Amino acid sequence: MIILHPRKEIPLQLTLLVPVVSVVITLILGALIFAFLGYHPLAALYEFFIAPLSRPDQLGNLLVKACPLIIIGTGLVFCYRANIWNIGAEGQLVLGALGAGWVALSFPEATTPFLLVAMAIAAMLAGALWAAIPALLKVRFSTNEILVSLMLTYVAALLIDWLVRGPWRDPKSFGFPLTKPYPDGGVIDPILIPGIGRLGQLHWGVLIAFIVAVIGWFFLSRMLGGFQVKLMGDAPRAGRFAGFSPGRVTLGVFLISGALSGLAGMIEVSANIGQLQPNVSFGYGFTAIIVAFLARLNPLAAIVAGLVVALAELGGDAAQISLKIPKVVTGIFKGILLFMLLAGETLTRYQLIWVGPGQAEAALSGNDKEADINV
Amino acid sequence: MAQPKSAKNTGKTPLLSALQVSKSFGDFVANQAINFTIYPGELHALLGENGAGKSTFVKMVYGLLQPDSGHFEWQGEKIQLSNPQQARATGIGMVFQHFSLFEALSVAENIRLALPAEYQSEDLAAEIASKSADYGIPLKADQIIADLSVGQRQRVEIMRCLLQNPALLIMDEPTSVLTPQETEQLFAVLRRLADQGCAVLFISHKLDEIKQLTSRATILRGGKKVAELNTRDKTTRQLAELMVGSQITDIKRRKPPAKQIPLFEVAGLNRPALSPFEVALKDIHLTASKGEILGIAGIAGNGQGELMEALTGEWCQPADHRIQLAGRELSAAGPLARRKAGVCFIPEERNGHAAVPSMNLAENALLTSYEDAKTVSGGVISQQETLLAAEKIARTFDVRRPSANPLASALSGGNLQKFVVGREIIKKPAVLIVSQPTWGVDVGAAQFIRKAMTELAEQGSAVIMISQDLEEIFAISHKIAVLNDGHLSAARPAGDMTAEEIGLLMGGAAETAQKARRAAR
């Protein structure tokens, strides 16, 4: 029998080393799987991690891919720091896209950039409202936020599907499930670098991602609100003793992460698609969970983590094209990465104790606080 | 298999003896040269206050700890108990105060999980049924733990021990979680076990129960054995005297203030127990006056935690009770509002309640000062202010730190406690409410903390101190009340009270205590 016993102190080198070790093990396991499937392991890893960095336009695409991951990941950091498990960022993203789309389609002639501001606000409100459902149910009825937020993702997917096939469909779309294209004012422009021009798909939304991460970091590390979030995660009893309300923190982190997921959905559609369609996201809401953990729940590190994960995503695409590695294999590779990171996180916080059968009772009571007091 | 091993033991050979057994943790001597004997079929009580060394002793008997010196003898032969398996193989079983059962599994499944391989049998259910009949333990093998009451769960734990045919059964404070009726049933089972030859070592501080159940008692105080006696020959009062010792009355107390000005009042506080491990608070009344320290004595698990939560406002339910500060109503106020009104708190648990181990001292200072406009303005925390505040607390209260602003977990228990106490006292609150201020703290730090509280009272604050340490209660309190099973006795001047009386009140023998009081007059 194995007992996970919380560590009294977590050494700094462990905190820094564990994510690195997790990534290294992922690389080794990935190489083994590629070799087992008959691909050259080094060539596969090259396609995954080096090839996407080899051309300037690829760098632009990398930033574009990382943009929603960084924004959503920053929001999820807040939830996970408070020990609140929002798994439904994907659905909140979809709702954000819907909120923004509704504003954009309501002003079909608009050319003013203020339309983007209104769309961003609508997207954040819609995402936050969607996230408020699991939060309020948890606070009021102690429901499990993991289940509720996850299930709402499927509701959101069906909602957008219905809207773009039904009431919001462009009559001139030849039967395709698409809305009318957004007006000019509702489209995020590409970044034009003087002398070079466009860098892949690079757009101004990427800048928002960096700003969001920096603001998120400032809030979490310098503001009282962030202090409450960390307190709820680290020592909820101390939080209550200090006079903070656990329910308000739960609601707060859900609203923040829902709003950011919504914002990511708005940027994704406005910059890359320009109209609503049944699929507006490539699973960014789920992939961002990896980003939040890879960043060790630090918004600034979410920038780096978002870029790393985006690299793996682009690399997966590249490997599919150039080496014909099936999509499911790249999915397995990402799964291994997440599993290793979470295992690493657990082993950082807990130590393993091995005990023989029948010894558990003694080992547990030995760790019992009551027993420790009564020396 | 069906018969306990002990059935073979007859005559006057002790079943288990401890010879000059000692155990220290660092500088702290938990057990000092303890001699102890228990005979087959005997109901033997191990009696003592919190920290008297009871748990250390039984942990050595059960193989969880090893003595530093001295040894144990089993049926006259020297034995070494290196781990619980060995103890169980020898014939020693133990039922812990806190159960480790899987709620979703059945009785039989739980027992099967915990039984060592050599006791596993094909038909566990039948064996449970036969043992149930033998000892009069009503228990069905297919019941799910989640559906069982606390008393029934305890029976599962007892059954688990009995299936290994112990000759000695150790029960660690078994009645602390039971209702009076369940206690009666437990005693019937234990008597039956003893009749069949199994010795029972019964750990408790409840004097009435000990007189009711056991024939002999070993009394520990401060890690030493102070008496071994026949419980039938002694009154509960004499037992109390031996348990708490009478030397503590000799400590000089400070003079109470001349004039009584009530500052903080609680009236009619009731709190239901929401889980079997909680103690319900029953109609609590207390008053803390200016310049006075009110000591609330009592043994752990009699409602201290529940009372503290109700006082801090962490448990705050709109009810008919009243909590007032100088006439100002606070009963519906949360911890922040109470703190703003001038009532500061120091909960018992440093780690994760009064302080956050994973945060640094500046952040821990912020924990109870974020309402200060200088510290937090516009939602932004002033790093400089919190650092200064932490520095000031650490300087004033002599907190030894490895660096200027370390994580709270990097401080020793005593130093973190000084920090936590200092954090509140430095605000000069009108009322300070503190639970177990010197728990797990070395002597020097404990003296320092007591002195700080005394000085705060001298400056005109009211102090309420919940403590299980009687010596501490007597050392600095002006008035003393006793918390027992959620009841708080009326506070009386410390000079009027004797240790025996408090010991009796702590043991729940309120009537006997009244008689003792009348007799003393």
Image: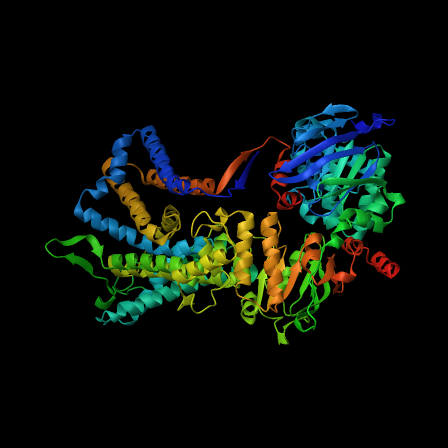
Q: What residue occupies the far left of the structure in this picture?
A: A195
Q: Nearer the viewer, residue B278 or B185?
A: B278
| Percent position of residue B482, x then y | 74, 59
Name the image quarter holding residue B36: top right
Q: Residue at x 84, y 28 (%)?
A: B7
Q: Nearer the viewer, residue B411 or A9?
A: B411
Assign the N terminus of chain A to one quadrant of the image: top right
| Percent position of residue B187, x then y | 82, 44
Colour theme = rainbow
Name the image quarter holding residue A260: bottom left
| Percent position of residue A62, x then y | 25, 48
Name the image quarter holding residue B307: bottom right
Q: What residue occupies the far top of the structure in this picture?
A: B77
| Percent position of residue B221, x then y | 74, 44
Q: Nearer the viewer, residue A232 or A169?
A: A232
Assign the C terminus of chain A to one quadrant of the image: top right
Residue B216 position (above or below residue B358): above
The total number of labels drawn is 0
Q: Residue at x 31, y 54 (%)?
A: A68
Residue A241 appears in view:
yes
Residue B352 appears in view:
no
Q: Is residue A103 left or right of residue B404?
A: left
Q: Nearer the viewer, residue B310 or A74?
A: B310
